[in-house]
Amino acid sequence: MDQSTAHELNEGRYANPFSVLGLHEVDGKLTIRAFVPGVDCIDAVDAKTGRKIVSLARVARDVFEGVASRRKKWFAYKLRVTKGDHSWVMDDPYRFGPVLGELDEHLIGEGSHKRLWDVLGAHVMTHEGAQGTHFSVWAPNARRVSVVGNFNGWDGRSHIMRSRGATGVWEIFIPGIGDGETYKYELQDRDGNLLPLKADPFGFGAEHPPKTASVVRQLDGHAWTDKPWMTKRDALHKIDQPISIYEVHLGSWRRVPEDGNRALSYHELAEQLVGYAKDLGFTHIELMPISEFPFDGSWGYQPVGLYAPTIRHGTLEEFRAFVEACHNADMGLILDWVPGHFPEDAHGLGQFDGTPLYEHADRKEGFHPDWNTLVYNFGRSEVQNYLTANATYWLQEHHIDGLRVDAVASMLYRDYSRKDGEWVPNIHGERENLEAIAFLQKMNETVYGDIPGVMTIAEESTAFPGVSAPTDVGGLGFGFKWNMGWMNDTLSYMEEDPIHRKYHHSKMTFGLHYAFSENFILPLSHDEVVHGKGSLLGKMPGDGDDKFANLRAYYGFMWGHPGKKLIFMGGEFAQGAEWNHDSSLDWHLLDHDWHKGVQTLMRDLNALYSTSPAMHQLDCKPEGFEWIEENAGEESIFAWVRRGPDGPPVLVVSNFTPVERRDRRIGVPDAGFWEERLNTDSEHYGGGGRGNLGGKQSENVAASGRAHSISVTLPPLSTIFFELKTD
C-alpha cells in the first residue's frame, strides 16, 4: 500500500476503504490489509481452523498488510490482534461483501421501496457465515460515512461504510454487533468537514434522553398472540361502528410516587391503562407521539427517531407487549404520527449529510415559525418514501391499528402561520402545498391498499375539501377527520353563563350544517386543556355542582351528536387542574362523589353508544339524524333523533339552563313508549335525581311539528336519552 493511502486511512479521510482494506488480489497475490487502531501486531488466521495464515506488517500507524503467499483462492479469515499481554480474535468488517441487492438499490433510487426499513437502518443478521449487524444509511452528499459506538471507541476511522453509488446509500456489515448496541453515524460533508454525530433516521431503538444515540433492536422473532383481533378489526373500523377513543400521554397518565414519581413502564401500562380504558367502555386508546423525541416538553410532537418507540417506558419488545395487551382486551391502538416537521437538534435529520437533505433549502419553505422546526421536503421522492414507509412500519411491524396525523393543515398550506413575503407560492402562484397533498394521498393509498383493517385520521382545522374522501375523486384519502369546528363552537357555548346562552344558540346547531361532509371524530383533546386554557371542568360556568352538571350535560350532548368520540385523559373524571405533562393525573379526585359520578357517566355513555345501533351506525350519514327542536333558543333546549338501520330510534334532549322544565312537551317521530335510557342528572352521576320515572308514553298531541309527543321533565343542566321500545 502506498503511504499516501495509508496516511489518509489513518486520518479518516479515505472515502472508499473497501477498495484497499480486506482481502484483495494485488500484483497476482492475495493480500490482506487491515485498519485496527492502537494494537501492537496482527495475524490473519483461518476463519474455520484458527491457524495462522500470515503476520501483517505495519504499513503506517494503524494500517497493517500481509501477503498470503500460499493461498491461491479466496478464503475466509479473521484477525488475531495483540496489544501488550492481551490477544483476541476478531472479524474484519472489510472482508464481507455488500448486503443490499440491485432491486433494493433500484427501489431506493426511485423512492418506491415499500419496506424501506428492511434495508436501511441497523439489522441483526447472519452474513457470509458471521453473526453481526448490517448498517445502512442514506447520505448522498457525504464524502464519507462511518458507524461509531462503544465497539470502536467512537472512532470514525474504524468502520467507514461502503458507498452504493448513485443511490446515495452507504452500508457496512459489522460482525459481533448485536441487539442492544449503541451507535451513531459520523459523516464528513462533501468538503471533508466533520458533522455532528447523527442518530440513525431508521433507528429502531434509542438511548434514554438526554442521551441521543441509536440502539440496535431486532425486529424479527416476535411471536404475536393477537390473531383474533387482527382478523376482525377491519369490520370494527368501518364508519358504521362505534369508535370511542381515549387519548393518553403515557408519561403523565399515572406515575409511581413511591419510586421517584417515575412514569409507568409498557408492562405496567399494559395492565393498568388497558384495563382502565376497557372498563370505561372505550373502543380505542390513542397515544400522543411515542416515536423517540429528545424534549419532554414537546409531548412527542417534535420527534427525532420516527422508527423507535420511546425508551422512556421500555424496549421495543415491551412496547409490542403493550400493543398485544390492547388487542387481547378487544381494544384498538392509535398512534399520533408527525410527518409534517422535525426539530433542529444536532443529532437529528437537519443538514444530515451537510446539505438540506430531508428539509427544504429555502427557510421560507423549510422552517416552521410556530414550532421552530424544519419542514420535510415533500417534493423529494426519497423523503416521501421515508415517511410513507414509516407509516407502514408502525402498522405492519407493530400491529398498530391507526395513525392520527398531526397538524395536517400546516402541511396543506404554504402560507400556514406565515406573513406576506415569508412563504413561497406553488407553481401556480397559489397557497396550496401540492407536494404535501400528493404525499398524504400516496400515504393513504399505500396504507389502505396494503394493510387490511387500519384507519388514518387527520387533525385538520380548516375547510379543506375532501379530507376523508377517496383519492380517486380528488380527496386526501383519510378514513376520518377531527371536527375542530364543532369542538371550538360547542366549548365556546359551554363557557357562556347560562343566562347568555340563548344569544349563542347557533354555536350548538351550526355543526349539523356540515356534520356529514366528512367522516368526523368529535375531539376533546389535550389541546383544550393546556397553555392556560384550564381543564374542561374549569371551563364550565357556575360553582360546585353547577360546574359538574354543565360538564355532564355537555358530555351527553357530545355522545348524542353524530360523529365518533375522543376525549383526553382526565376528562373522563372531571380533572380539576390543567394538564401537566410532568405529573400524574389527580386520581385522588375519584374519592369525591362528583368526580366519581362523571367517571360513571362516561362508562354508561360509552355503553349506550356501543350497544344502541341508532347511536353509531349512521354517525357519518345524514339519514341518521333528525332535528326535533333546533330553534328553542330562549330555553336553551336542543332535541333530536338518532336512527340506525338495525335498531329503534333514540331521542336526545339537552337543557342548558339551570331551570327545571316540568311537563315540557317534545315531539316524537313515532308513537309508543319512550324509555329513559340515560339521564345525566341521575344521582349515580352526582346529579339531583330528577327524571321521568323510566320513560314516557307518547300522546296524540302535536308538538315540535310532529303528530305525537311526550311530556317530560327536563332537569336543569342535563341531557336525557329516550329510546323507543319496540317489544
Image (cartoon, rainbow, N blue to C red):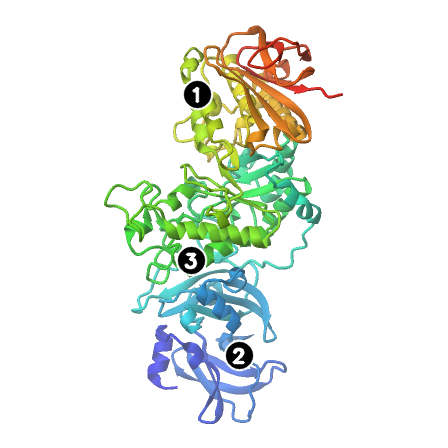
Q: In which image quadrant can residue 235 be found? A: top right
The mark total stands at 3
The residue singled out by tag 3 in the image is 383
Q: Relative to the observer, which residue lies in front, 369 or 55?
A: 369
In the image, 469 versus 41, the foreground residue is 469
Going from the N terminus, do you reach mark 2 or mark 1 first? Answer: 2
- Closer to us: 549 or 72: 549
x then y, percent, for residue 412: 39, 45
Give the left or right position of residue 427, taking residue 21 as reference: left
Task: Relative to 1, say whether 496 is above or below.
Answer: above
Q: Is residue 566 left or right of residue 279?
A: left
**2 vs 1, front mark:** 1
Q: Position of residue 627 (x, y in %)?
A: 54, 21
Question: At which x and y percent is residue 509?
Answer: 47, 23
Kind of residue at badge 2 = Leu
Count residues near mark 2 (Cα–Cα under 10 Å), then give few for <14, some for 14-19, many for 20+.
many
Q: Is residue 143 above or below residue 198?
A: below
Q: Which residue is mark 1?
A: 506
- Secondary structure under tag 1 reads helix
SS state under label 3? helix
Chain-order first, disc 3 or disc 2: 2
Residue 521's disc number:
none
Cα gap from disc 3 to disc 1, whole angstroms: 44 Å
> Quick one: SS at disc 2?
strand
Name the residue that disc number 2 marks: 79
Dot 3: few (<14), some (14–19), or many (≥20) neighbours within 10 Å?
A: some
Q: Is residue 201 visible?
A: no
Residue type at mark 3 is Val
| Earlier residue among tags 3 and 1 | 3
User: Badges 2 and 1: C-beta atoms under 8 Å apart?
Assistant: no
